[in-house]
Image: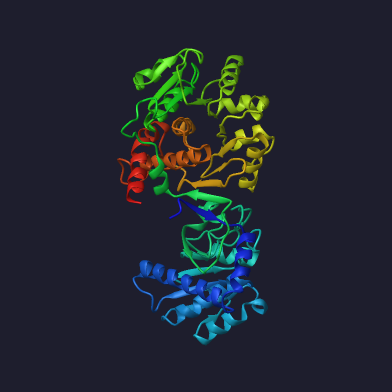
Amino acid sequence: MSDRRGYFTADEVRSAEAELFTRVPAGMPMRRAAYGLATIVAEELRALTGGVAGRTVGLLVGSGDNGGDALWAGALLRRRGVAVHAVLSNPERAHREGLAALRAAGGRVVERFEHPDLVIDGIVGISGRGPLRPAAAEIVAALDVPIVAADLPSGVDPDTGAVDGPAVRATVTVAFGAYKPVHALAVPHCGRIVLVPIGLSLPEPRLAQLDPAGIGARWPVPGPDDDKYSQGVTGVCAGSAKYPGAGVLSAGAAVAATSGMVRYVGSDAEVLAKFPEVIASQTVSETGRVQAWVFGPGAGTDADARDRLAQLLATDLPVLVDADGLTLLAAEPALVRDRSAVTVLTPHAGEFARLTGAAPGADRVASVRALAERWGVTVLLKGRATIIAAPGQTTLVNDAGGSWASTAGAGDVLAGILGALLAAGRPAAWSAAAAARVHALAANLAAHADAPAAAPISASPLLAHVRPAVRVLRALGDQG
């Protein structure tokens, strides 16, 4: 079983479909897709209303194959006693066989829906680009029932997940044959995502998401011969008199992520007050052996901070650079560009713009890959969908499942978790994606703790839930 889910571009899927068409009878892939779509719609109707027969489903039908998928699915639903009404965006170009099947089954073509229980979005597929056209946008905006998207929500770019105008926001998206980047990069528009296999032979993915159970199985835990040094010693150079909390959060996260030892560089007494197991020193040169460094959160951008960063980057150890460290690198990229040891940069969108001179833009994956290749580093771009790229490697993505971690200090916690994994000897890109998953899960656990409903959090409860989040993933790993 793979430890990751792959996502495939529109071009990759079209190539795989062309190969499939040489192996199976004409129309079979569409029939498979439509059967899967109809099955999911029936399940949704049952969950919504308690039954299938006697319910009403609307079809939003475009002129491409996605419209054909919706029409064939409508024909199958009609045979199960569902009233099916289709609105055709372009009647002359509607999928001929699918429309004939719908009409033969007793489905109707209408101008407008009248109180459907659910609507299937079959407006555009992977060849579609740009927002919904005005007529379709008007219909979608008027809907107040669940929408099941055929393959992807119309109006959302299949390869970038970008939304630049009216678009469908689905309750469920039924992906045909393969997951596409949109299914990782625009989850709020996709809703729950269900894959329907149709027999595609796919290449190795260039974009993937780590499986939570796989993360848990590879998370560092002490073996019978381990000691505090062999489990990974994380060095943390963070915080200052102006930002004392940054050191607390970064060092505390490294402790919680099960580092064998955490060494802290700085004069912040609060770090030791909160975490007496941390070993502190005043300078980098006084610090004992470490296996990876975290630099930047609250560290300042003055000459002293610059010199500390340069000192760390001059070592042959993995170095994670965050926050103030990224501001220093933006002013002096040469500090890191020629480095042969592992370097991980963890910017948010604003810091990314300072590093590159431009915002990530609509194609965030391409932008992160370009920076990683140009500077020879691993880059983690923060966001609801966090993107991790390293030169010559599969790009990784982690959908957080929410935005609970969008709070001051949360990035300091992420830096500490990631630093602990680097110190344990895990590969940089894997460490970044695994840290992002634990960070997101910890935020979710914190948001749902001690309350009947989820509530906004701050960084301190997020930090308190890092270890429980690790336990959850470890349990999944043990089961898998």
Residue drawn at (42%, 16%) of the image: 280
State the residue lying farthest toward the bottom: 104
Please provide percent x and percent y for residue 459: 42, 32
Query: Is residue 76 or residue 264 the one in the foreground?
Result: 264
State the residue lying farthest toward the front: 225
Q: Is residue 341 above or below residue 158?
A: above
Query: Is residue 50 or residue 381 the one in the foreground?
Result: 381
Image quadrant in which you'd find residue 274 = top left
Q: Is residue 264 above or below residue 444?
A: above
Query: Is residue 365 or residue 16 the one in the foreground?
Result: 16
State the residue lying farthest toward the right: 357
Residue drawn at (37%, 70%) of the image: 46
Residue drawn at (45%, 20%) of the image: 289
Q: Is residue 45 above or below residue 422?
A: below
Image quadrant in which you'd find residue 254 = top left
Query: From where the camera sits, is residue 432 visible?
Result: yes
Please provide percent x and percent y for residue 157: 62, 56
Query: From where the camera sits, is residue 448 visible?
Result: no
Horizontal arrangement in the rendering, residue 319 relative to residue 252 (left or right): right
Instruction: Give the colouring mode of the picture.
Output: rainbow
Image quadrant in which you'd find residue 273 = top left
Please provide percent x and percent y for residue 334: 68, 26
Residue drawn at (60%, 35%) of the image: 377
